[in-house]
Image (cartoon, helix red, strand yellow):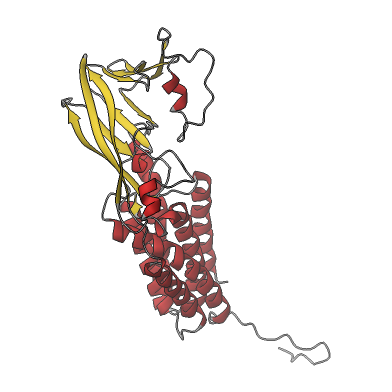
Amino acid sequence: MRGGAARVLVVVLGALAALWVAGPASAHVGGGRAGSDFAARVLAVDPPMPGVSVRVLSFGDEFEVVNPTATDVEVPGYSDEPYLRIGPDGVWRNANSPATWINLDRYGRTSLPPDADPAAAPEWVRVSTEPQYVWHDHRTHWMSPDLLPPAVAADPTAEHVVSEWVVPMAYGGTPVQVRGELTWSPPPSPWTVWPLCAVLALAGGAAGLLARTPRPLGALLLLGSAAALYHAAATPEPPASVSSHAGAVVSALLPALTSVAVAALGLLAARRGRGGVTGLLAVVLGWLLLVQGLPDVDVLWTAHVLTAGPALPARAAVVVLLALGVGCVLGGLAAVRRFREPGRRRAPHPAADEPVPAA
């Protein structure tokens, strides 16, 4: 390998090491699922709470309240016992409320301690100094992981309203109802996703194995980096509980920006006819694309996508990340073997019994 290619390899591997330590980033900052057939939304807050933000996250799996005002928001538990106080002094949670323990798990699979009693006097524990809180409120999502709602099981080809839910609150002593709905939508047909995956994976392999020049492989690198950049740009706003929004967004953008840099180097190498270097960078980019796409693989078979933009391009970006990631790895390995850099082949050594001409 020439000195220039070796330097490129060292720089790229250093960037990959940094990304590996940081851990793979996904488009849904804060973790959780990237796709689901369920979706929940808030329809009304009655009466309104000026300045208070209320929303459901992760398709209804989590409920968030952000209250920067000087007035407390109080949230009762499932037996109408005191559960949460969210306000200027942060978040206080009643340790004696059964909801405190039930809401720790997405499906409520938590054993209650002996003193968890809705009739007991509240024991307030401060759980945050910030006026915001996210929890699993079991009224906003479907609670049976292995069982579809009856209406969905009867007709899984149609959209359904699974439930119309209410989360009660109090704002400055005034009762408030947060009303919303949980819906279910049929997942996309496999024939709309998997053929495209196969075409992209085969295109990457063919570009490295069959093309006469490395330019087709370089063009595919550009497509992969564009998908990575869109995937990161469509990152939805993270929950307020994420300690650093800027840091979370940067962690999602870092793999995409690295992908753009690697693709630019690969395209430049391809235009110069450096097939071996192009193949090497294709392998690196393929790995990067897979790191970004694999955490979101569930969007390939679910109806809804966690994204800040339209669902279709977000789903297409994940398809490109995964399928072209595989294609770039295969095509890159093939290109490294097929293309030889000028000057790489050395002159054969003379045989031991052959005379060596005198200088």
Q: Quarter of the image for the N terminus: give it.
A: bottom right
- Relative side of 359 to 68, left or right: right
Residue 69 appears in view: no
Using the image, determine if residue 347 lies above or below residue 230: below
Quadrant of the image occupied by residue 136? top left
Q: How many marks?
A: 0
Q: What is the x, y in percent for residue 308?
A: 28, 49
Q: Nearer the viewer, residue 123 or 259?
A: 123
Q: Nearer the viewer, residue 25 or 284?
A: 25
Residue visible at 47% across and 58% down in the picture: 288
Q: Quarter of the image for the C terminus: give it.
A: bottom right
Q: What is the x, y in percent for residue 62?
A: 37, 35
Give the farthest residue toward the top: 121
Q: Nearer the viewer, residue 238 or 352?
A: 238
- Relative side of 329 to 85, left or right: right
Residue 164 appears in view: yes
Using the image, determine if residue 273 lies above or below residue 227: below
Q: What is the x, y in percent for residue 229?
A: 34, 57
- Relative side of 225 to 170, left or right: right
Using the image, determine if residue 329 lies above or below residue 95: below
Q: What is the x, y in percent for residue 240?
A: 32, 33
- Relative side of 159 to 51, left or right: right
